[in-house]
Amino acid sequence: MQLQSFGAACTVTGSMHLLTLDMPGGQRRVLVDCGMFQGGDEMEARNHEPFPFDPAELDAVLLTHAHLDHIGRLPLLVSRGFRGEVHCTAPTAALAETVLLDSARLQTDGYRSDIRRARRQGHEDQVRPPLYEEADVHRTLALLRPHLTFGQTEKIAGVRVTPERAGHILGSAYLLLDTPDARLLMSGDLGNRESGLQLDFTPPPAVDAVVLETTYANRTHRPWAQTLEEFRDALRDSIRAGGKILIPSFAIERAQVILHTLKELMDSGEVPRIPVFMDSPMATRATNEYFEFGDELIPRVRDALQAGEDPFRPSTLHVVPTSAESQRLNKYDGPAIIMAGNGMMTGGRIQHHLKHHLWKPSTNLIIVSYQSPSSLGGRIVTGADTVRIMGEEIAVRAQVHTIGGFSAHADQDDLLAFLSTAGKPHVWLVHGETAVMDAFRPVLEAHGLKGDIVPDRQTVDLLGPGFPTGRPPGLVVEGSAEHAARVTGGE
């Protein structure tokens, strides 16, 4: 079993893992996820690089879930020659249509805006075209095979594939791949066992190797009760300030959790009823899928759906369908909650609201999602005095609240619980910052497990011994003494 990771290796975005598996009749090349890099300009530039393999030679693509950083480059893969099948669960296929069409639209709109600006400056040749357009998405959707069902084994490209519930978002699955040599587990993204929405992940069986996400492998989330209290208090303080309350939110899972939580807090009287504007057409469309696939949700949400109720609709909710209506919110007086995408503030309508309100001391920004250090949100969290938004330098005078307990990702305790039923596998670490993965390795060792950091783009033998130090040769871990010496120019 050989693995090459061309995304989510030593970073938390752009998941794309190429497996080369020895099977009767020859090798099989299976791609697990094909995500888009999100973050700063340097990270997003990787989306435009050629694939380091021939897409036409892939035997199959498997998807773990429908977040953009796991499926966002699928249309590019198709436009560059992939003609095989893309296998996923039914909810993943439904959400993928929403996510990819929205991605194509944003890229096309962004390109048109950028090219107009560049023409005025005489630099139109420096503007990158969109990665893909809507027609590419439709060609991709035609290749989706939404037949994967939790607990049921399918034979794909000669490999026995069994998806199990990952508990991260609707339709999310970790994948068990059986070959004559071994059983491999590809975790995708695993869920927080104290999710306010999703059922817990299914405990895995014993396996020989695990490729494991590590987004929060060096920490534990706040308990759900504390998260609710923190969110409630942030809302109360924000409402007293009298200004706008901005909540950047990913359209899938996070938006639905926040809407459900707002409804409960307002219905119980713990938070005053003020207008809530859902300024994300994608989140609105995605929420519709939760009505069809409610059996994946925690009992009180599932039961509400089955009773014909809408657990995602606070009584003061207003859906904002058009960009013109979104812009009119700037003239709205008084306190109001504005939820808009995207969660890391790297694009979408939230940037429009930040531009108009981030510089006001009466504004409150409530951050409920992971922020990549290089993203706009990451710079705000780390205390930047000003940030560049839509071509302008904007002062950061708003009150910033960071609430980590809403995370849909497993924390360290969740990851250890997940591994506790998996036997004694070799654990290969992906989808994490290098410092986080390096801190997790001794924790694994204390539990009798060997953990190795997967290098970016290099081939590793998943059944081999790994690296003597757990780090790939040449890898410098951020925050280490070696990293500090390089930064300062020391020896």
Image (spheres, helix red, strand yellow):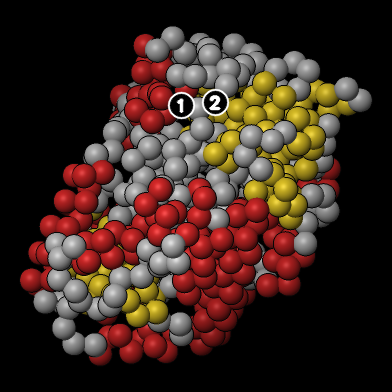
**Residue at image mark 1:** 418
Whether residue 154 is visible: yes
Amino acid type, callout 1: Phe
Q: Residue at x 73, y 68 (%)?
A: 138
Amino acid type, callout 2: Pro
Which of the marked residues, 2 or 1, is nearer the chain's N terminus? 2
The residue tagged with tag 1: helix, strand or loop?
helix
Q: Residue at x 72, y 33 (%)?
A: 153
Along the line of sight, the residue nearer the viewer: 330 or 317? 317
Location of residue 136 by image quarter: bottom right
Q: Residue furthest left?
A: 240
Location of residue 440 by image quarter: top left
Q: Considering only vertical position in the picture, is 110 above or below 161?
A: below
Q: Residue furthest front?
A: 307
- Say whether marks 2 and 1 touch (CB < 8 Å): yes
Q: Position of residue 365 (x, y in %)?
A: 23, 64
Q: Residue furthest right?
A: 25
Crowdedness of circle 1 by 10 Å Cα count: few (<14), some, many (20+)? some
**Residue at image mark 2:** 204
